[in-house]
Amino acid sequence: MSMLADALHAFNPLYSLSGFVVGGLVGFTGVGGGSLMTPILVLLFGIAPTTAVGTDLLYAAITKSNGTLVHALNGTVDWRITRRLASGSVPATIAALVTLSWLGKTAGHAANGLITSALGFALLLTAAAILFRRWILDYIAHHLDDMSDRRVCALTMTLGAFLGVLVSVSSVGAGAVGMTILLALYPRTPTVRLVGSDIAHAVPLTLVAGVGHWLMGGVDWLLLFSLLIGSLPGIAIGSHLAARVPDHYLRPALATMMAAVGVKLSI
């Protein structure tokens, strides 16, 4: 009873409110929750970067498992693409976690500093992927036209490895960055199948990374529960209203905000 009372006393409804707002924005725009939630936890609530990233990774694993189930039932997951991404991201994630663990043991402040810098970089990269997606796709298509399946496979695995490191250290980047490159690598695959494949890949990526951060003591379970209470209904409401509310103004505004926060965290 005392543990329950302590937990209720420590519960902060502002975490759930933040989860609801971020969930609604994700439902509206499709912009990854980590791009919004992790900076809020670090800058607004003063959560340690290691704890913010670890908690957000498990939060993403839980929420995206539901999205994967929906896509799988609808037949909109290309498991070949998902396997290619995961074969690159999972080993890279483990390597990144080992590096973070070593930094945490030898120089604790270095791990927090690395995560903060990586978060700033990931936010800038995500903002660029949102704002300049059309130009990025045109450039890549011009230089990577008529590739063999073997080369596409190798590049997909390389993308997975890059995302594994980026997401493990910052919890940001899998959605906007990953989707932009996938659209260029698989131009003949329907977009909905690429979205489903990307979400399905995010589950093992964020789960492995989140468990790694948990083993390093970087997960706040009460915070995770608080975020889920708000975000799950927020995502449902945002997704329901997405078709009625144009997001061509909201997405650039969010990307600009991410860029500003990314600059702040990087300097």
Image (cartoon, helix red, strand yellow):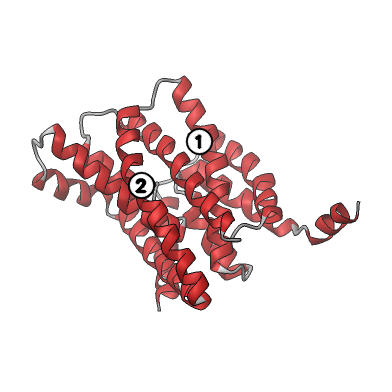
Against 115, residue 230 (above or below) is above
From the viewer's side, name the closer residue of 96 and 260.
96
Q: What is the x, y in percent for residue 201? A: 40, 38
Number of the label disc, if any, that sits on residue 9: none
Q: CA distance from mark 2 to mark 1?
A: 36 Å
From the viewer's side, name the closer residue of 45 and 137.
45
State left or right for residue 140 relative to residue 120: left
Residue picked out by circle 1: 244
- Name the amino acid, label 2: Ser
Residue picked out by circle 2: 89
- Name the amino acid, label 1: Arg
Q: What is the x, y in percent for residue 11? A: 77, 57
Local SS, label 2:
helix
Sequence-first tag of 2 and 1:
2
| Residue 252 seen from this side | no
Question: Quarter of the image holding residue 82?
Answer: top left
Q: Residues within 10 Å of mark 1 (few under 14, many from 20)?
A: few
